[in-house]
Amino acid sequence: MVQRVAIIGAGVSGLASIKACLEEGLEPICFERSNDIGGLWQYSDSVVDGRASIYRSVFTNSCKEMSCFPDFPIPEDFPNYLHNSKLQEYIQMFAKHFNLVKYIKFKTLVIHVKKRPDFPVTGQWDIETETEGKVESGVFDAVMVCSGHHVYPNIPTDDFAGIEKFKGRYFHNREYKGPEKFRGKKVLVIGLGNSGCDIAVELSNVASQVYLSTRNGSWVMGRVWENGYPWDMLVLTRFDTFLQNLLPTAITDWLYVKRMNKWFDHETYSLAPLNRTLRKEPVFNDELPSRIACGTVVIKPGVKEFTETSAVFRDGTVQEGLDYVIFATGYSFAYPFMDDELILKCRDNTVTLYKSILPPRLEKPTMGVIGLVQSLGATIPTADLQSRWFIRVFKGLLKLPSESSMMDDIDEKMGTKLKWYGQSDTLQTDYITYMDELASPIGIKPNVPLLFLTDPKLAVQVYFGPCTPYQFRLTGPGKWDGARNAILTQWDRTLRATKTRVVPSSQNCFPFFALLKILALPLLLAAIFVVFN
């Protein structure tokens, strides 16, 4: 009998999970409470309870080559960074190409997920759903939770004394859709994350003044990196990861801070994080420094308290006449369909998952959480690999360590997270390290030394080039025959997106400064040798 897998949510993680089930001969049944796929990227003018909500102007922060499904490249005529409507179009194309929609039950709310009485033996789950008022229940062999983590807004009103006195309007950025009603108003945005910065920059074009409050600061990166290339095509490489792991911490910290300040000096712009060496996910915004320089966005410290019309900041300054306060303060994890949230929150009321996927204390490994982990890498390829890993664990093709060993691994990862990313409720990790950690036991991690011997042209791209998702479809289970060509042509598709006008090539001879860069290290070593001898 074919085993049935319940998938909760038809966003990118849910679609990846459906496909992973089909590749392994399982029967997926996906429950989606809305009437369409896409999850977070399914834009709506209204805010719906229990569903993710984005504003109209949202763009991706990962470029198309780094954020696609690994066996379905984003079309070459799409821009490098996609508007939410363009990404939703790609998601629709993916689902149609692999015929995934027929496995989805739309307008279906998952009410209850609970273990069956014989769970220690069978690992099965009872799931109760509601579709347009009709309640149904079913038995499933496994559950993949793909409900995302941008649904339940976090508004820490207890941290902001006097907010109840404020006579203007305050709300979470989840309710924000566009700038129209803020024309001529004074707006305070609390939170220096991607959403907070996007909203502050957008409002600065119409509001009389925008203030952006941050307690800890943050590094800010542009999507456009050196020589105009996408940032992640240059930063997320295996060679770069190798250097980070090889070099002493003092050197990697210095290099990291230097790289982050290369675009502009964050201290000058009042943005510098309190702990400059933490690898917390930076903010991606191409316009914020310009808005600060023009005075339309003013960076302020954390808010101490509110009065009826003003905000008092922790440095003692006061901003009068505020009309709106927007809390861009993130989201909370919640699983209202779980009778026993301890399945996921098994220690200190925090989400505790082995490999950021598997509850370690289940008697049977038949529940996986897909898409909860956060890193510099894109969600789509991460969810794709997570779902493939979980399915193979569920089928018994990957052997798990003991519960104590899994908890030890979680503790070790938590220690690493605190060292590199600081205290945070999110499951943050290094992208390439994490992806390889999942890929190795499946047998799909690229064997770089072997590639240098058998296919050096490909090896150079895999090791020194961007770690694009195609690398995890080169070999092993789920191999895609087009992966090699996709890697070798990834820069062609990237450049084609911006080369929309024929420009005569400059007739450059080999530049003197390029030669100087190449010779810099040996010249420096020679100079040191001469000085000390």
Image (spheres, rainbow, N blue to C red):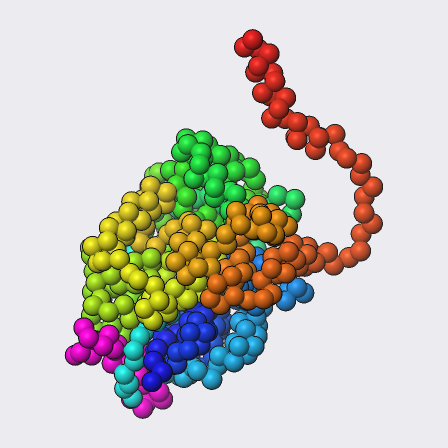
> Which region is colored magenta?
109-135
Instruction: Left or right? Give the position of 199 relative to 510.
Output: left
The quadrant in which the C terminus is found is top right
Q: Position of residue 491 (x, y in %)?
A: 65, 54
Query: Can residue 258 be found in the magenta stretch?
Result: no
* Camera sees residue 188: no
Image quarter of residue 105: bottom left
> From the viewer's perspective, is residue 303 above or below residue 492?
above
Image quarter of residue 397: bottom left
Please report the residue visible at 69 percent of the width from the left and 28 percent of the height from the top.
Answer: 516
Q: Position of residue 388 (x, y in %)?
A: 41, 66
> From the viewer's perspective, is residue 48 above or below residue 189?
below
* Camera sees residue 72: yes
Instruction: Left or right? Give the position of 521 relative to 327.
Output: right
Please report the residue visible at 35 percent of the width from the left and 87 percent of the height from the top.
Answer: 131
Q: Position of residue 43 (x, y in %)?
A: 49, 71
Query: Can residue 121 be found in the magenta stretch?
Result: yes
In-front residue for pair 488/396: 396
- Residue lying at the far bottom in this picture: please name it: 134
The quadrant in which the N terminus is found is bottom left
> From the viewer's perspective, is residue 521 above or below residue 478?
above
Q: Position of residue 354 (x, y in %)?
A: 29, 58
